[in-house]
Image (cartoon, rainbow, N blue to C red):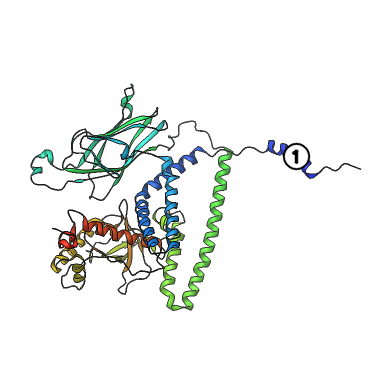
């Protein structure tokens, strides 16, 4: 009788042989790691301003909802805030080294206010960061900047020395007494911004650091007393892009080819499954529209949304990724890369846009600009809100209309629109601009519109509540700001306007 080995003994004999024959997992290709890091950094940088605005709005909404006793809603908002913080903590913070203004030593007339560095009135004004710990390697200095003219004050501009400049010259360098001190000295120019609210992202470099810690200095090479120059979000971003290929580049390895084949196969399978599901869903929508004509408008809107996803794919990151999850802006359709129509706006908050050959009438949600005609009934509503005369209200309406024309002309517009139009065919919308965020905020900050929040609705999402709360908070800040702007400057003292 042959001896019988237990299964566990057989496994112990075979396992070492299997382990010896199983090759270790191939390391991730360097080009994939580099591309992913570059992509993440670009995405996070482009969306950071809007995300910060959204996170602050969520904070305010959380406090208001909790004070009202709706703790489940407050908990949902808190979870969304934690998601945003974790998102940035796991990407931007690991790819860039921040240069916080709280740790900077200011020189000359430079001033630090919150997250903004300003006050470049005299030559040599600047900031210095001591003992910055950074991993040796190649970096770019990146920051956001706005340069505009200082307000006119008396005869200060009588001399050409005090005329506003169209550009400013700055220098950034590593402070060291070693022989290679000049290698990390970079001089760069900052151009004048189109307006006082637009911040442009600027990159300076490359810089090659061989030691840690380092001392870094940023200063103006001349004084700019007639300009207001504001810098924010200064950071050192590692350069992860691959160097150009040289002669004799090795051919792709079998592991790389296998990975590419697997990636292609996965994408093809996903696209096939998505296309099949979309086709089935569109057919069901068509049947629903035929059986229930009363739902035609809603079905048409949903059909357009699905068809747009079919052409654009599923890789959209940015505002949609921020707002599309739980607590987001449900019930809106996205319009990308629209343009302001050539004809003059009806009002500061009512105008036409051109998108894919179509001309659409738009009304900005949650705000109310005055009509330009003093006989219009809307003038009374605006004048009562600000406590001003009807003539002044109509004048502010004309100014808001001109402001919108100048501010939006030639810029790519991103809109989130309600699928249900007003009776006259106008689309209620939220309007977003690159590097600015919600355009409604701009009109409120300038005192050109009245905030008109909608009636309370318990079904309203957290994102909508947050944006509405932000508008109300900004209007209160504009009302109290000194000197007041727009209609607040014409308001009676009791309304927060001129004394």
The quarter of the image holding the C terminus is bottom left
Q: Position of residue 176 (x, y in %)?
A: 32, 25
What residue appears at the point 17 percent right and 46 percent down from the top-left corner?
150
Residue sitting at the far right? 1
Q: Is residue 176 left or right of residue 13?
A: left
Query: Residue 141: which quarter of the image?
Result: top left
Query: Residue 90: which quarter of the image?
Result: top left
Q: Note whether 266 is above or below 384 in the view shown.
A: above
Residue 324 shows in the view: no
Q: Position of residue 460 (x, y in %)?
A: 40, 66
Please count the marks in the image.
1
Q: Position of residue 387 (x, y in %)?
A: 17, 66
Residue bearing mark 1: 12
Question: For the residue carrying disc 1, how many other residues have a C-alpha within 10 Å: few (<14), some (14-19), or many (20+)?
Answer: few
Residue 99 shows in the view: yes
The quarter of the image holding the N terminus is top right
Q: Is residue 296 left or right of residue 338?
A: right
Q: Is residue 19 left or right of residue 130?
A: right
Q: Position of residue 430 (x, y in %)?
A: 33, 62
Secondary structure beneath dot 1 equals helix
Q: Note whether 41 is above or below 381 in the view shown.
A: above
In this view, the residue in front, 220 or 265, is 220
Q: Note whether 350 is above or below 157 in the view shown.
A: below
What residue appears at the point 40 percent right and 53 percent down from the top-left corner?
318
Q: Note whether 179 is above or below 90 in the view shown.
A: above
In this view, the residue in front, 355 or 160, is 160
Query: Residue 396: which quarter of the image?
Result: bottom left
In this view, the residue in front, 389 or 311, is 389
Residue sitting at the far top? 179
Q: Is residue 337 left or right of residue 150?
A: right
């Amino acid at each position: 009788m042959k001896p019988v080995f237990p299964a566990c003994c057989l496994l112990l004999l075979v396992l070492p042989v299997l382990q010896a024959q199983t090759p270790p997992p191939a390391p991730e290709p360097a080009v994939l790691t580099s591309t992913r890091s570059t992509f993440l950094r670009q995405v996070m940088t482009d969306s950071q301003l809007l995300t910060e605005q959204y996170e602050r709005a969520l904070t305010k909404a959380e406090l208001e909802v909790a004070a009202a006793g709706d703790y489940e809603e407050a908990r949902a908002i808190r979870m969304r805030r934690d998601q945003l913080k974790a998102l940035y903590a796991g990407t931007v913070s690991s790819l860039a080294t921040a240069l916080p203004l709280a740790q900077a030593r200011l020189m000359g007339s430079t001033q630090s206010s919150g997250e903004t560095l300003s006050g470049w009135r005299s030559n040599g004004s600047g900031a210095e960061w001591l003992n910055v710990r950074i991993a040796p390697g190649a970096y770019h200095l990146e920051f956001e900047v706005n340069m505009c003219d200082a307000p006119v004050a008396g005869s200060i501009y009588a001399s050409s020395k005090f005329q506003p400049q169209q550009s400013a010259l700055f220098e950034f360098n590593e402070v060291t007494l070693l022989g290679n001190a000049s290698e990390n000295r970079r001089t760069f120019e900052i151009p004048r911004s189109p307006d006082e609210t637009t911040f442009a992202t600027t990159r300076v470099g490359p810089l090659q650091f061989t030691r840690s810690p380092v001392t870094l200095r940023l200063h103006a090479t001349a004084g700019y007393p007639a300009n207001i120059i504001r810098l924010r979000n200064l950071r050192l971003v590692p350069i992860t892009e691959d160097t150009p290929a040289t002669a004799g580049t090795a051919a792709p390895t079998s592991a790389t080819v296998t990975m590419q084949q697997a990636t292609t196969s996965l994408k093809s399978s996903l696209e096939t499954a998505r296309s099949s599901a979309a086709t089935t869903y569109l057919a069901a929508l068509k049947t629903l529209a035929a059986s229930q004509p009363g739902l035609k408008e809603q079905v048409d809107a949903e059909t357009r949304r699905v068809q747009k996803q079919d052409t654009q794919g599923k890789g959209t990151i940015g505002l949609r990724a921020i707002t599309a999850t739980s607590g987001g802006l449900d019930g809106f359709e996205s319009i990308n890369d629209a343009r302001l129509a050539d004809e003059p706006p009806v009002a500061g908050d009512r105008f036409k846009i051109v998108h894919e050959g179509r001309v659409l009438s738009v009304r900005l949600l949650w705000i109310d600009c005055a009509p330009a005609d003093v006989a219009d009934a809307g003038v009374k509503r605006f004048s009562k809100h600000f406590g001003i005369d009807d003539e002044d209200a109509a004048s502010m309406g004309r100014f808001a209309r001109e402001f919108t024309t100048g501010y939006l002309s030639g810029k790519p517009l991103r809109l989130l629109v309600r699928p249900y139009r007003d009776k006259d065919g106008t689309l209620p919308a939220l309007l977003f601009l690159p590097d600015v965020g919600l355009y409604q905020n701009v009109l409120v900050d300038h005192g050109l519109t009245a905030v008109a929040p909608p009636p309370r609705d318990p079904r309203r999402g957290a994102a909508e509540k947050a944006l509405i709360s932000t508008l109300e908070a900004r209007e209160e800040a504009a009302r109290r700001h000194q000197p007041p702007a727009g209609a607040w400057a014409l308001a009676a003292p009791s309304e927060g306007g001129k004394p």
